[in-house]
Image (tube, rainbow, N blue to C red):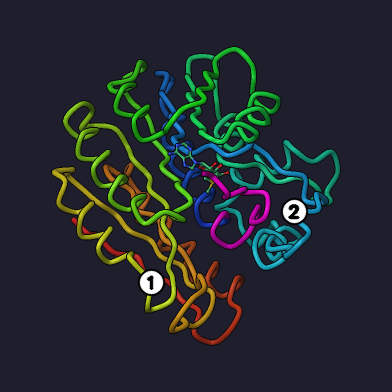
Amino acid sequence: MLSYRHAFHAGNHADVLKHAVQAFILESLCAKDKGYSYIDTHSGAGGYALSHEWTQKKAEYAGGIARLWNEPKKWPQLAGYFDAIHAMNSSESLENYPGSPLVAAHFQRPQDRLTLMELHHNEVELLRQNLGRDGVAIHHRDGFEGLVGLLPPTPKRGLVLIDPPYELKEDYRRVADTLKKAHKRWPIGIYAIWYPLLAKAVDRSEGLKTALANLGFEQALCAELSVQAQADDFGMHGSGMIVLNPPWKLDEKLAELLPALSQALAQDNQAGFTLEWLK
Ligand SMILES: C[S@@+](CC[C@H](N)C(=O)[O-])C[C@H]1O[C@@H](n2cnc3c(N)ncnc32)[C@H](O)[C@@H]1O
């Protein structure tokens, strides 16, 4: 039973980290004329109206993208990410926010191929409404199984984004198992994996990092952003992105971005970031 709906969280601090990293990687892929493949294993609805009652319930975007939006000059390195958001808004005001599929669609050129997977039947219907077009394949299926079946993709260079809800503990194991199989089929792909930083009693991020560092990929870069102190029992205080086979200079771009981003998104004085090579 799938209960997670991303509309409740659209544009929050975790989306900012995830989509900023996604945009950096897509910019690198666009630096060459040759086409690339983009595969999203857990796509969600594709894009979100911030006025929707689900998004308004906790208005998480207020502690996320809304903190950056009014000062675009402060974030020159995020111009590509900001452009993807602008593409969904007719004025300067922030009314809509792109999910990872619409961020990818913003960068897509005619020679690039997008494959979007989503298991929830309502979400996939919204995804079809938001992204049904030439050059975009939408699959209503399990993204872990689907990914292995799609590899190696054509074009043969590209990015896979893996962004499960982690409401089921088995998602952590499935991420690692899937990437083990993916490494056998497409070892040169770039893989970006999002994960939450949770309260001490329930956090599983260290195990995930260790598992992904030992899969055989040549390099593993890990960026974490926490916006508040870690609680003991429950709650998410931040999130991380692991990038396997990161593009050239992604580490430098993140080293420049993360100090300012962690300050801008801080909710208390325990906010901070880490950037490390796991491998
Ligand atoms: C965190 S959201 C995705 C957000 C999206 N990547 C973005 O950045 O805009 C996770 C999505 O995964 C979907 N989902 C959960 N389990 C899945 C599975 N096994 N395969 C594919 N999609 C799944 C959920 O329905 C939900 O829409």
Q: Position of 146 compared to 65: left or right?
A: left
Position in image of residue 202 (x %, y %): 38, 71
Q: In this rendering, is residue 275 above or below 228?
A: above
Residue 148: quarter of image: top left
Residue under label 2: 54
Residue that lies at the very extreme toward the front in this rendered image: 1
Position in image of residue 210 (x %, y %): 20, 60
Gap between marks 1 and 2 measured at Cα = 26 Å
Earlier residue among tags 1 and 2: 2
Q: In this rendering, is residue 227 above or below 93?
A: below
Q: In this rendering, is residue 230 above or below 27?
A: below
Residue type at mark 2 is: Trp
Which quarter of the image is occupied by the C terminus? bottom left
Does the segment drawn in magenta span residue 10? yes
- In this view of the protein, which residue sits in the foreground, 194 or 92? 194
Element type where label 1 sits in the image: loop
Instruction: Count neighbours of disc 1 (C-alpha within 10 A) and say few if under 14, some if 14 to 19, many if 20 or more.
Output: some
Q: Position of 115 compared to 68: left or right?
A: left
- Quick check: is the Cβ at mark 2 less than 8 Å away from ligand 1? no
- Give me the residue at 39% from left, 34% from top: 159
Element type where label 2 sits in the image: helix
Position in image of residue 99 (x %, y %): 61, 42
Q: Position of 222 compared to 124: left or right?
A: left
Instruction: Count neighbours of disc 2 (C-alpha within 10 A) and say few if under 14, some if 14 to 19, many if 20 or more.
Output: some
Magenta residues, as a range?
1-15
Does the segment drawn in magenta span residue 118? no
State whether the magenta stretch is mostly helix, strand or loop.
loop
Residue under label 1: 202
Residue type at mark 1 is: Val
Are the residues flagged by discs 1 and 2 in contact, CB closer than 8 Å?
A: no
